[in-house]
């Protein structure tokens, strides 16, 4: 530990900025979702932006869509709200109820993603990390506890083989 751990950890998140962005996420989500305060939130992104108007092009082909992802344990529901990286606007919320999805699984390849199929053709892939810091693509946020809780919820309540 000691001196070595200082070099392993790398830069630390700016918690003040992260908390301010978490508040913005909550405000947007609560405005868009009835009983939004009953949902826990994480921020994520998807490369499937064909049905969202809130994607942006990065590089030559990758299209990134920013997502505010809410989950509610008492109803086994995930609500996905597309947004822009600075959280100045958002799109329409989409709800995924456990008993209404065809399948859901956690993919480890090529990235760690939570994948939900609402039917045989339509799906959403949610990428979420403990710390997203590229402000040109994503909101700046630190969310290790929230991501751990969402991962547990998704794996135990939402995954269908």
Image (cartoon, helix red, strand yellow):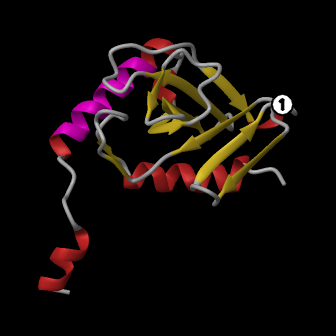
Please give left or right for residue 12 compared with residue 106 in the image: left
As for residue 101 lying within the magenta part, the answer is no
Would residue 44 appear left or right of 7 to someone viewing this image? Answer: right
Tell me where residue 62 appears, x and y as whole percent.
52, 36
Image x and y of residue 13, in percent: 22, 52
Q: Quadrant of residue 124?
A: top right
Q: Is residue 48 left or right of residue 18?
A: right
- Tell which of 28 and 38 is nearer to you: 28
Q: Is residue 24 magenta?
A: yes
Locate residue 76, reporting x and y percent: 68, 38
Q: Residues within 10 Å of mark 1 (few under 14, many from 20)?
A: few
* Quarter occupied by the C terminus: bottom right
Look at the picture and state if 9 lies above or below 75: below
Residue at image coords 12%, 84%? 3
User: Residue at the left extreme?
Assistant: 3
Residue at left 49%, top 46%? 128
Q: 35 or 26, which is in the foreground?
A: 26
The prevailing secondary structure element of the residues shown in magenta is helix
Q: Is mark 1 on a helix, strand or loop?
A: loop
Above/below status of 120 relative to 12: above
Does residue 52 lie above or below 108 as drawn? above
The quarter of the rendered structure image containing the N terminus is bottom left
Tell me the magenta residue range. 17-29
Report the front residue among 74 and 156: 156
Pick whichever, 45 or 141, lies toward us: 45
Q: Position of residue 77 (x, y in %)?
A: 66, 33
- Name the residue that disc number 1 marks: 121
Residue 80, quarter of picture: top right
């Amino acid at each position: 530990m000691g001196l070595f751990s200082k070099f392993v950890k790398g830069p630390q998140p700016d918690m003040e900025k992260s908390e301010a962005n978490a508040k913005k996420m909550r405000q947007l989500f609560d405005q868009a979702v009835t009983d939004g305060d009953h949902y826990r939130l994480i921020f994520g992104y998807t490369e499937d932006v064909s049905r969202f108007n809130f994607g942006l092009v990065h590089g030559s082909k990758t299209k990134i869509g920013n997502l505010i992802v809410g989950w509610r344990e008492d109803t086994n529901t995930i609500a996905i709200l597309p947004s822009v990286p600075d959280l100045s606007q958002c799109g329409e919320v989409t709800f995924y109820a456990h008993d209404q999805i065809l399948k859901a699984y956690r993919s480890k390849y090529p990235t760690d993603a939570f994948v939900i199929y609402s039917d045989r053709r339509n799906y959403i892939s949610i990428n979420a990390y403990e710390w997203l810091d590229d402000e040109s693509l994503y909101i700046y946020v630190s969310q290790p506890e929230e991501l751990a809780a969402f991962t547990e919820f998704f794996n135990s309540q939402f995954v269908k083989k």
